[in-house]
């Protein structure tokens, strides 16, 4: 079974490449028993969705960086 370091490494690699069947199964088993890594994975997914939306100009939650500097 994977340890947390290896699991988070695989979750990061999963963003760039397709994991092997063995890697996917090992990661899935680890995530079934590890709340911390499950939370890390959900945070990664949320951050990725936010950044994709922000790159497309869909995010209105945070002002552009230049506007934020002017408001101080």
Image (cartoon, helix red, strand yellow):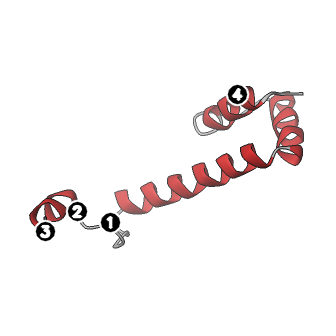
Q: CA distance from mark 3 to mark 1?
A: 21 Å
Q: Earlier in the sequence, mark 2 or mark 4?
A: 4
Q: Quadrant of residue 22?
A: top right
**Which residue is under mark 1?**
57
Left or right of 55 on screen, residue 35: right
Query: x and y percent of residue 14 in the render?
Result: 65, 37
Vertical arrangement, residue 58 with respect to residue 44, above or below: below
In this image, 49 relative to 68: left or right? right
Mark 3 secondary-structure assignment? loop
**Of the residues under marks 3 and 4, which one precedes in the sequence?**
4
Q: Secondary structure at mark 2?
A: loop
Q: Earlier in the sequence, mark 2 or mark 1?
A: 1
Q: Which mark is residue 71?
A: 3
Which residue in the structure is indicated by mark 4?
Answer: 5
Going 22% across and 62% down the picture, which residue do you hit? 64
Query: What is the CA distance from the residue labelled 3 to the residue labelled 4?
Result: 40 Å
Spatial CA span between label 3 and label 2: 11 Å
Q: Which mark sits nearer the N-terminus, 3 or 2?
A: 2
Report crowding for label 1: few under 14, some 14 to 19, many 20 or more residues within 10 A (C-alpha). Answer: few
Q: Residue at x 19, y 63 (%)?
A: 68
């Amino acid at each position: 079974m994977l340890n947390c370091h290896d699991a988070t490494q695989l979750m990061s690699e999963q963003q760039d490449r397709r994991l092997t069947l063995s890697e996917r199964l090992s990661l899935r088993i680890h995530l079934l028993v590890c709340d911390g890594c499950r939370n890390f994975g959900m945070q990664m997914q949320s951050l990725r969705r936010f950044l994709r939306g922000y790159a497309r100009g869909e995010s209105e939650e945070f002002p552009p960086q230049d506007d934020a500097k002017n408001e101080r």
